Structures are given as structure tokens and as C-alpha cells.
Amino acid sequence: MHLFAYTNCSHSPVVEDAWRHPAHEQTDGVRDLSWWRGLARDLEAGGFDGLFFADSFNVADRYDDDYVPALRRGEQVPEYDPLPLLTALADATDDLGLIATASTSFYEPYVLATKFATIDALSDGRVGWNVVTSSGRNEFANVRGEYLDHDERYDRAEEFLAVCYALWTDSWTDDAVVRDADADTFVDPDAVSRIDHEGERFSVAGPFGCAPTPQRAPVLFQAGQSERGRAVAARHAEVAFAFALSRDAFADHAADLRTRAREAGRNPDDVRVCPGVTPYVAETTAAAEAARAEVRDLVEPETGLVRLSSHLDYDYSRHALDEPLRDVPAEGIRGVLRAFLDDDRAWTIGEAAKRYARYPVPEPAGTPAEVADELERWLAAGADGFVVMPALVPRTLDRVTERLVPELRDRGLLAADAGGGTLRKRLFGTDEPNARHPAGRRE
């Protein structure tokens, strides 16, 4: 199994109200480079495969049609850009995968392809890209000036990815850099070519400015759970990050994604499906449950309503907390709502708000053996690993590395030494995308 730690460049990656808790250090650490380097080293030593950064370009303003609630609740604000941070973390670690979110709606393909190629080169092939299309109207107002509806965002993403793949895999041969002083040639001109992409949304001539990097293309992460999002994940994702409240709902999602991958000409094993989880691990069951209750008591419903409204692009201020949570017309992250609607219980808006303030992921609490038992049940339901979403940083992650990881290793579920090499080699045994992936090179 694989373990990824979820974070962002804000004061809290998961529980926005965590800034009230004395054990939560990220509120101050977010702008401290030494703190981030220490966290990355601890995760690497503690058995994690990668550190996963979420990101956005807005201050949420959908709830009550204003950004004031988001500022008051600290809903992912202030927030900084993770891409520059990855290079520092690459220098601080040797094996840890470094994954950053970047939106196909807000970059141009050549620009973003260059950024990821640079980080892949500097990290010796440890970079991953969490591909998102974004949904916040304020994000689009800040960057594009026009809003793209759900399906148009995914249409753009598909062409965006095609351009990036061409730049990364088609523009340069492996031996293009010859450094031949006798021939007075640094790069063989015959080994570099334009891509001449002319599409509906992008016109990119090339050639690419970066020589091939250790992975050629970053490992592709994706978390789409809408109908269109699943279709894109089936074609492109190498790691699919999933939100699910119940094992049954997750099992259905994982099976559907693997079926779609097969129909897209891929092997189902080409996609690692990793649900989010927030574990509470302690020496006794009672202590773990008390730690979970302590975090839950921090959460205010409005925090979740601000986040839910932003992610769905739907204003929940118009509803009472005791109303049943129902399907709504939403142009945002539709899979967010499905996680609740597909659950095996009915939710009120207030209950869903408090839950979404911690994200819709399982929260197993218990001894290392008890939490490992629950993770094994999720593995049996189709999980290939987990994205650990820490309630308190670094306490949640420390308790995973110090208590849970040894239990998982004793059970043979987690390698004692995942080994070096590129992130893709760590996950799949090869440096480059295989020939079944759209970015794979074909003979």
C-alpha cells in the first residue's frame, strides 16, 4: 500500500478551526521554510510515499455572497503557492514524492509543462501533478475574467493534457543533449522537433525548452468524482484520490473507475486508487476516541458551510441547518455532494457542514491494531493506499508514523524500505508512463 500526506500552503490543510488548538503548528509553520523541510524529512523517514499539496486562487465568496465569512473562519486563507516550495523540499529529502495541485483552467500548457519539468529535473524525478479544473467563480474572476462551466472546464483539461504530453514526450529524444565539443554542438538539432499543436483551445508550436527529465512526465493525480471527472481520471490518472464516507460507496467508486480505465485501453492496475482518511491513533481506544472528539468540538458549522458553498459553487446561507441535504444544481466539485448523498445515512445541512469542515473521509479512531484493521477493510474494498488528511499538523502525522506505520509493516502491508528512484518507479516500477497511458511513448 502507499501513503500520501495531504496538506496545503495555508494555516490548516483539513480542519480550518484547528488554529485554536495548541498542538497544531502549521498556523505558524506555513511561512517557515525550515518547518516545511522538517515536516518533509519526518514523512520520508516515517514511511510516506509523498506529500500532496492542494491549492486554489481565491478567497471563497460564495457563502452569503461575500468573502467576509471566509476571512472570519480562515477558510483556506491566507494561502500561498506550493510550486516554489517543492524545490526546497526536494533539496531536503531524497525519496519523498512531491505532488502539487495546478489548474488547467488558469495556466497555459507550455508554461505549466515547463514548471513541472523543472521540478522533476531538480528532484531527480519525484514530482507529481494533481490535475484540477477548478470551480470557484472568484478564482475565474481573479485569473481568467470569465467563468467556464463544468463540461467546458474538462474539455479544456483534455486538450491541455494532450499538449503537455506532446511537449514532455515527443519534442526531444533521450539522447538530444550531446555536448560534443569536436562537433561544436551542445544539442543535436535533429533530435528536437516542434509539436505543432493546433486545437480548439490551444495553439502551441514548440519545440519544448526543457530536455527530458527523469520521469519525462510527472505522475498524474486526479480527484474527479463527477461523471465527467471519472471519465478523465480513467484516461489520465495514475493515482486517483477519492472522497468517500463509507466503504461500500468507495468500493463502487473504485470498481467503476477501474472498469472505465479498462474501457479506455488501460490496465486497471495502471491506476492506484487512494481514498482520503483522517486516522486518530493512540495507545488505547478511549484515548483515540477522545482525540477525535476534541477535534470535532473545535468545528463550527459555518466553517463547513463556507467550504461547502465554495466547492459546490452554491450558496448554503439560504438554507436552515436542520434541512435535509439534497441534490442541488451545482457547477462546482460535484463529487463533494455525492459523497454525502451516496452515504448509507441521511444528512442534514448542518450535519454535513460540520462533517465537511473536516472533509468527507473516514475517521477511524483506536489503537494501532484497530486502525490497521479498518484500513485493511478499505484495502479489501479496492484501496491501493491512502491519502492521510491530518486534523492537527504535525500531531496526526506523527502518530501515524510513530504508531500506525510499524503496525502496517508488521502485517506486511507497507514496505520497510520503499527504495529510491523516481516517484513513478516507486509506485509502478517504471520511470516513464507506460505505453497504455496517453503520455506513454510508443515504439
Image (tube, grey):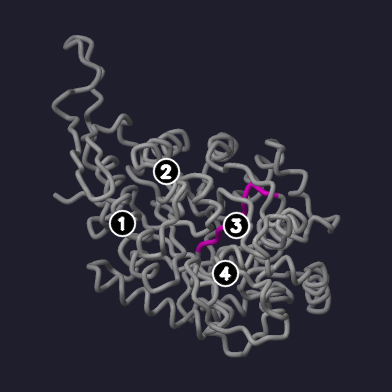
> In the visual, does 267 lie left or right of 43?
left
Q: Earlier in the sequence, mark 4 or mark 1?
A: 1
Task: State the image coordinates of residue 111 (x, y, percent, origin top left).
Answer: 38, 37
Sequence order check: which comes first, mark 3 or mark 1? Answer: 3
Q: Is residue 171 left or right of residue 225?
A: left
Instruction: Please report contact status of discs 3 and 1: CB closer than 8 Å, yes or no.
Output: no
The alpha-carbon separation of the residues under discs 3 and 2 comes to 25 Å
Circles 2 and 4, Cβ within 8 Å, touching? The answer is no
Query: At label 3, which amino acid type do we have?
Result: Ala
Q: Quadrant of residue 158?
A: bottom left
Which residue is drawn at the image coordinates 47% and 47% (left, top)? Answer: 145
Callout 4: SS: loop
The percent position of residue 45, horizontal first and vertical second, equals 62, 49
How would you rate the neighbour count of disc 3 (Cα within 10 Å): few for under 14, some for 14-19, many for 20 or more? many
Image disc number at residue 314: 4
Residue of label 2: 107
Is 264 one of the magenta-colored residues? no
Which residue appears at 57% of the width and 68% of the height?
Answer: 276
Badge 2 density bin: few <14, some 14–19, many ≥20, Cα 10 Å: some
The magenta stretch is: 2-10
